[in-house]
Every structure is written in structure tokens, then in C-alpha cells.
Image: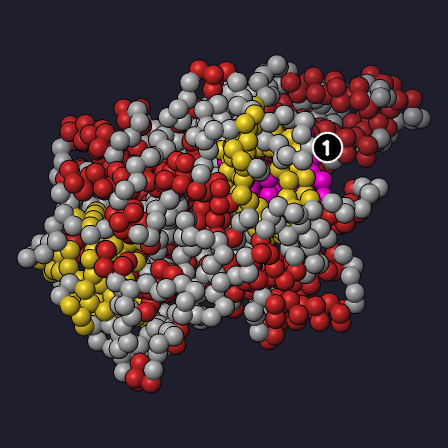
Amino acid sequence: MRYLLRRFVQGIFILLGVSMITFFLPTLYFSPLALAIQVLGHNRTGSTAYHIWATQHGLYRPIYERYWSWLDGVLHGNFGISYTNSNRYHTVTVNEVLGGNIWRSVWLVTIPTIASILIAIPIGLTQAMRRNKPYDHIMTTGVYVLYSTPAVLVCILLAFYFAIKLHIGTVGVNPLAQQQSPSQFPGFMLHNWTQFLLPFAAILFLSIGGLSRYMRGSALDTLVQDYVRTARAKGASPARVLFRHVLRPSVIPLLQIVGLTLPAIIGGALIVEDIFNFPGMGLLAVQSVEMGDFNTVLAITLFTAVLTVVGNLLADVLTAAADPRIRLGARI
Amino acid sequence: MSLLRVSNLQTTYSMRTTSVRAVDDVSFDIEAGECLGIVGESGCGKTTIGMSLMRLLSANGHITGGEIDFDGRDLVSISEHQMRKVRGNAIALVPQDPMTSLNPVTRIGTQIAEGFRIHGGSKARAMTRALETLRMVEMPNPEERLRQFPFELSGGLRQRVMIAMALVNEPKLLIADEPTTALDVTIQAQILDVLDGLREKLGMAIMLITHDMGVIAGRTDRVVVMYAGRKAEEGPTTPIFKQMRHPYTRALLSSVPSIDAEHTERLLTIPGLPPDLSKEIVGCRFAPRCRFATDECTAVEPQLGGDDGHVYACYHPVDGPELIGASVAGLTKDDDVRDSATRESLLTVTNLVKDFPIKSKRLVPGGEHLAVSAVANVSFEIGQGETFGLVGESGCGKTTIGRLVVGLETPTSGSIVFAGRPEGLSGHKAKVADAKLRQMMFQDPYASLNPRKRIRDIIAEPLEIQAEGTNKTRFARVLELLGEVGLPADAVDRYPHEFSGGQRQRVGFARALAVRPKMVIADEPVSALDVSIQAQILNLMEDLRDEHGLSYIFISHDLAVVRHIADRIGVMYLGRLVEVGPAKQVFSEPAHHYTQGLLDAVPIADPVLAKTRKNKITGELPSAIHPPSGCRFRTRCPAATEVCAAEVPPPSEVSSGHIVACHHPLRTTVAIEATTASVPLL
């Protein structure tokens, strides 16, 4: 438990660090005046109106004060104003812009990741058991092809061959998805599963290569352990040896790797969302960066960090659940 | 009809291009209830025999000939499915390393019960059975253990679990493959006693595979001596030790240092290395290393012959052990050189303390800060040219002292003073200057040499750090050192992996000697080596010590090795030095109960003497985080009283230079004043 508590406290500090970096960099880059012009438009005479707006929004305060009030807002669930969507007549908050995008992205990352773990474990395990046999070589080749293909290419190939040639799944997600509330979205996904098939498959293909390679290596390490021989010396059948003695020790390191590769998966999701028009954070991020809507970018970056930290924490919890040495604080 | 009859067993490992016949045409029997010892150096095929019997060879290993008749069935020809019914049931295995042989993520009870369940035991009885077997192996607090995980247990307790696991179905044959090699002597004695007792109680046969002649001598009925995949000699235990016929058996026994031998004797070594089994071998396999070999030996391989029950494969059988010093010239050393009374002091260690802080509840303010007390108030002195042996169980702090003296750790308090150390230096410069005084020789010859460096660079590196000489003179020094440690000059451009364990240890020694240090700290320098190679390295260390006037701190868990090489000995227990004195006195007249117990636990290569041992240290080493108050040994001491718990025993003198820290010493002592400067303090 102490181990998890420590990891949790670490996670909080990581998020604090990320928030500082994401806040200070764009803040130093955009002058208050530039933001005011972005919101109020170019056609004002003189600079007074812009300065008044910037003062009203507290942009002339010292940077640490601005950070503090921003952080205060974030902790209360308020991510500030979306400058590009606001104008002199009405204000649009980042919360409104983000809407359900974050939750949709969480679905896009977690479902294929869990699926790829479930597929990678048997692939890696069977490869390890047939080490250097034709099966192993064929799988290795296949996995490397997946592993080394850029995300963009995976998406395009999927869209081209499956959606266009074979009519399995669709090239894009119906824009209606944007209007679903977080609670409606899972139902919407199930109902229109053909639209979500290819973006999910793309993420799956992107993550499965690395994971199954790692699982193979981990299982190879376990298979030569003395305790596996002990199990065989007890008269255990190959299946029993595999499920009782090889599986768990091999999966434990894999959990950590999933946590570590999570940022890469989220990064991949960004591209996948853009290509399949999936209304998630990635798509929004691309649009916000293009338009210079920095509070929205800030919020998305922070959420990505939260997702990574939470994912890692989850991996730690699972590791502790699976490994008594960590749970009970052995000095390894 | 024997329980097990192995006839003409042949086991081959296929390599990428060649194949290695690890066991070649070996036959032996084991009677029900008998203990058969299989002994030999690494690579002789002893483990392969065990794995062949279990049919648990690695993927590239195959039984290529012969029969294994066990209880009326041929284990070679039965199907894998049938074999699974034999494994863990009629034949069980106790492997070498208990630290890695238990599943780390499964509870002890479940692991023991698994074997019972596999062979048809009911689920309801399984845990009860696990508890019963834990009681059989005399596990302390057995109920509690069932729910524990392996990492919560020490090595000795884990080996008890391994034995319990093997016993769960009451096997007829127990294959114990080096069951105590990874354990301390005191724990080794306990485990071997457990095995002995169970054999008697359950009437099971044991096949005891080991490299340790001492373990074999005390416990077995008969012995098979293996050499290079062949059976060299087989016979009842006493004749094998007292009237051996094969020169290899004799050489193997002579290269083991004896715990009560006079230390002036030089160890007999077996020159060379065992043959490469992937090549065709003509003639006797031992002939190239045998002093008695003739043309006949190298032409045709000798067949096994001899009296009923005692067979050997040799044309020129010897008769009993060698009379040491009589037949081979130059075996006795010059005794005068090793007189330790009149030495100038080289190293003075005073009140040395080393605590290793461990992570504590730092999130809680005022939380307890825990520390492992690795070295607690240790003082000793080493003279010029003297060899100081440090002995004790693992975890007693002997390695930490070595690392402190060599500067790899910083003492928590206390001082380490070298005579002749330059004054006024600090920081990195002081470290470099100190490195000229003392160098370290490491335990593991495989891990302590950088695999990507050539031998010349490895040996020359200390010289480079000292900025000594030019490239040219350094290279000359490397060649000189290689000559001194008995390696060929063409070794300079080779990499560590091209050498055997013994040769690598020579490289490690050469590296330590490169800067001509006054002292070499050798931490278990021979414990990873086979006995014949061990003897070569020990002789080399003695030769170079006498030649260069070196001092050694020789750290070892092997009392016989320390007895052989050391002038003075320090016995450590849980961070404390409990007894110091001249090697001869400490071994012949131990004054501390711990020293006595250690000595009695050492297996001796004499079947008659080995069976007379009785004093045993019971229990396990306590935690160094909360060491016992007063005398740290009191929890395992037969003579402990209240005063032992209350006060740390002060040092007292048994005889000149022989000092003990005990409230109830085994010899009469005189109290010494702590202020006497000339006496090494405890």
C-alpha cells in the first residue's frame, strides 16, 4: 500500500510539473495584446480597447499570479476562456469546447489497448514456447511489420483496403458523434460499431507490435527460470506449467510496459482521430493549435498528462495485485 | 533387484555445429533406502545424470542410449505422459538454488500442495499434507509458512520448503542436486541432517549430487566419481576415501584444503583443464592431467574393473591417498617466513562502524529511521606481509569490511589507517593515492571483468588511473604480470569470455597486482571455482605473497580455505568480530561458541570423522536491522545467560594475540584493558 501511496504522490507532482510547463511556454509566447486582438478582431481603432480587454481578463498581472489563478480554476474544473471561439459579444469557455471530446478519446485509447494486451499475451507466449520454430519466425515478421509501420500509413491502408475495397467499416465517424453526451456515447458506439471499427483497429495495430514482442521476451525469460523446472519436476502437465507458473510472472513486466507506452498510444490516437474524423481530443488539439486557442491546447495537454499518469498508476495497482513481492514490500 | 538400475546411459546435448556427450556409457544401481553420492567437478555430467533420470533435460539434451530401470519400468522408453506420473511422485528432485527454484508469486502452501494434487491427492487433504511435510522438514512455525511467499523466507528455510515439496508424495528416490551449495555451512549441516533423518524415517533412497567431497564423506553409503562424462570410480564411501584406486579421485581429494591440516603444506593441484567433450577422445580422459599416464593410457580407454563393489577405470591404479610431501618435491613451504610475531603494522582498523540506512516511513513525520547494522565496532590490525582471514556466515559483514578497507564504502564511524599513506590529500586525489596501497580481487570471475575489454586493457587500467609510465612501459608491465600469474603472453589481446573461470581469476589477480599494492583484499576469490582450480589459485596467491611481501585480507565462508592460507583469522558474527587470533589457535582451540559451532558444521572429507560430529548451531541468522542486544550470538548460543543479553561482551585474551569476545568463553581467558595500544581491539 505504501508503494501505491508513493506512486500516487509522485503522480500529483508530475501533473503539477506538466501544468507549469504547459502554462508558462504559451503564456510567454503570446502577448496579452495578441490575445486581445484574436478575441476582439483587428478592426478596432487604437489599442485602448485591446488593453482594456486584457486588463479585464487579468493578462497584465505577473505571470505567477496568472498561473495561480489558472491553476485555481483548473482545480475547480474551469479551464478558462477559449479565445478563438469567444468574441466581444459572448464568451465561450474551454469546458464548452472540450465537451465530450475527452471522454470519447478515453474510449478510443482504452478499448483497443486492453484488446491489444489480451491478444499480445497469447501471441507472445506461444511464440516463446515455439522459439525459433517457423511459427515464431512468421509471427515475428508480422509483428515487426506492424511495429514499424507509421501510424498514418496504418490508417490510410485500413481505410483504403477495408472501408473502400472490402466495405468493412467506414472511412470516418458520423459527425453526430460530436453531439452525444458522455453517457450516451457508449450506446452510440455499439449502435454504429462499423464506424468505430477502423479507428479502434488502427490503435490496436499500433500498440500490439511492441506489446507482443515484449511478452515474447518476458515469457522466454520466465520459461528458463528454475521454478518452471521445479513445476515440471512435480509432474505438472505442460498446460499446468504454463498457466500456473509461466503466465503470471511473464505478464507482470508487461503491465509496466503498457503504462510506459501509453503516451505513444495517445500520440497515435491523435493521428487516428484526425484521419478518421473521430471527435476526440486529438482532433480538437490539431484544430486548436492551428487556430492558436491556447487555453484549449493547455487543457488538452493537461488531460493527456492526466491520462498517462492515471494509466501508469493503474499499471502499478495491477502490478502490485499480481506480484506479492511488490505488494508486501520485499527488497528485491 | 535394485530400486534403480542405470545401464550404459548416454546423454547428448546438440549444439549448433557439434554435439556434446555429457554422460557417456554410465551405469550404476541404487538400492531402496540407500544414499548414493555422485561427485565430480563442474562439467563432469553429474547434474545431467540427475536430469536424465527425471527426463527434465533442456530442449537440446537427449538420452541417446542406455536404460534407466526404475522399479520395473524403463524410464527411457515410457511416454512423456507416463513419465509425468513418475516425476514428483516416485522420483522427486531437490534442486541446487532454493532462491530461484520457488515460484515467486505463489504461496508456499499452494506450491507444496500442488505436487500432492497433481498426483491424485484430494483437495481437502492437500493443505493438511503440506503442513505435515513442513513439519517433517522441521520448519519453524509451519502453519504461518503456508500463507507466506518465498521472498519472505531465508535461503535455508526455502531449501526446507523445496525438500517438503519433494516429499509430499513420499517418493522412493530423492535426487538432491547440490542441495546445500548455495547455503552457509551452519545451514548446510541442518539441511543435510534433515535429509538424513527423512531417509531413515521414510526409507527412501537419495542420490546426492555434489562437488563437495566433505558432504559426500559424511552422508553417503556409496560414491560414484565422475570425470568428463564417464564413471572414473565407484565404491562404498569409506574405501573411496581411504583406499581410492583412480588417480583422479586421489587428486580431487588432495586438492581440498583440510581444516585441520598444517598450513605449511602446499596444496596438490591437478594441472590443466578437463577435456572438451564435443571432440572425439582417444584413450583415458584423465590421461592428459595424470601424473601416472603412460602410452597405454593415451591409446586405449581403460575399462572398468576391480573387486566386487569397488570398480575403477585405470591401468595404473593408485593405492590410497598420497603421502603429502613425501613423494613430490617442493611441496613443503618454508615455515620461517610465516612467523607472524614480528611484523610491522600495515593496516589499523579502529572501532569501524557501517550502517546501511533503509527506506523508512518517510511520509510519516517522526517515522522510525531503520538501518542495517552491517559492521558494528570492529577493530583489528594487519601486519606487513600478513594474511588476515575473515570468516563468517553470509550477512555477517565480512564483505562490507573488505569494501570499506578498499574504499568502496565510506564508514559510518571509526577509522581505517594505512601505514605509509600520504598525508594532506583529499577527495579524488586521496582515493587515487589510496588505490596504490590496496587493491581488490573479486569473487565472481565471470561478472567482474568487463566483457568488452581486452585483457591488456583490463590489467593496464589501474596503471592508467595512477598515470604510471607510458603505453610502452604499461604494456611491458602487463606482460610481466601475465607471466607472474601463469597466463600465456598471447592472452593480452583476447577477451575475458575466451578464458575459463580459473584463468579469469588469474586475470583479476593480475589486475589487482598491477600497481604493486601493499595489500590485496580478496573477497571469496576461489568460491566460484572447482576444487582443482581453487588449489591452483590458492598456491599462486601464496607464491606471489611470499615473493612480493604482500598482505592479504582473505574473505571466505570456506573455513578450510582460510585455514590453509591465513596467518591470523577473524571470526565475524552479525557485524561483530567475535574472535581473533593466529589461525592455528583459533582452529585448534576455539574460545567462542560460534567459532566452535562453525568448525563443527564444516563437512570434512573423511567418512569416519564426519560421522562423529555433534555440536550444531541451530536456527537462523537474526535480522541485522534489530540485532540482539548484548552479545549478538546469544539467540543461537548454547551457553547464553542473562548477562549475555544485558552487556556486550568485552574482549579478553586466551593467549598472546588470541582474543575472544564472550561472557562464557570455552577457554580460560584474561581480561585485557581496552587502552593497551599494542593489542588489537575487538
Above or below for B574 versus A236: above
Foreground: B54 or A76?
B54
Q: Nearer the viewer, residue B247 or A283?
A: B247
The span shown in magenta is B396-418
State the image coordinates of residue B219 (x, y, percent, origin top left): 25, 47
**Residue B293 can be seen in this image:** yes
**Residue type pointed to by label 1:** Ile
Image vertical order of residue B215 relative to residue A45, above or below? below
Can the viewer see residue B280 in this picture? no
- Give the residue displayed 20% in from the left and 30% down from the top: B132
Number of marks present in the image shown: 1
Question: Whole-percent x and y of residue B404?
Answer: 64, 40
Is residue B415 located in the magenta-colored stretch of the structure? yes
Between B379 and B530, the one nearer to me in the picture: B379
The residue positioned 13% from the left and 43% from the top of the image is: B203
Q: Is residue B526 left or right of residue B166?
A: right
The answer to whether residue B667 is magenta is no
Res B407 → quadrant? top right
Name the residue located 72 percent from the left edge and 44 percent from the top edge.
Answer: B418
Neighbours of disc 1 within 10 Å: few (<14), some (14-19), many (20+): some
Question: Among all residues in the image, which is located at the extreme right?
Answer: A46
Q: Secondary structure at mark 1?
A: helix
Residue at x-position 50% and y-position 15%: B646
Colour scheme? secondary structure
Point out residue B632 in the picture as x, y percentages from the top left corner: 49, 26
Above or below for B517 versus B131: below
Q: Give left or right: position of B354 versus A39.
A: left
Tell me where residue A15 appears, x and y as whole percent.
Answer: 64, 28
Q: Quadrant of residue B157?
A: top left
Chain hosting mark 1: A
Residue tagged by mark 1?
Answer: A21
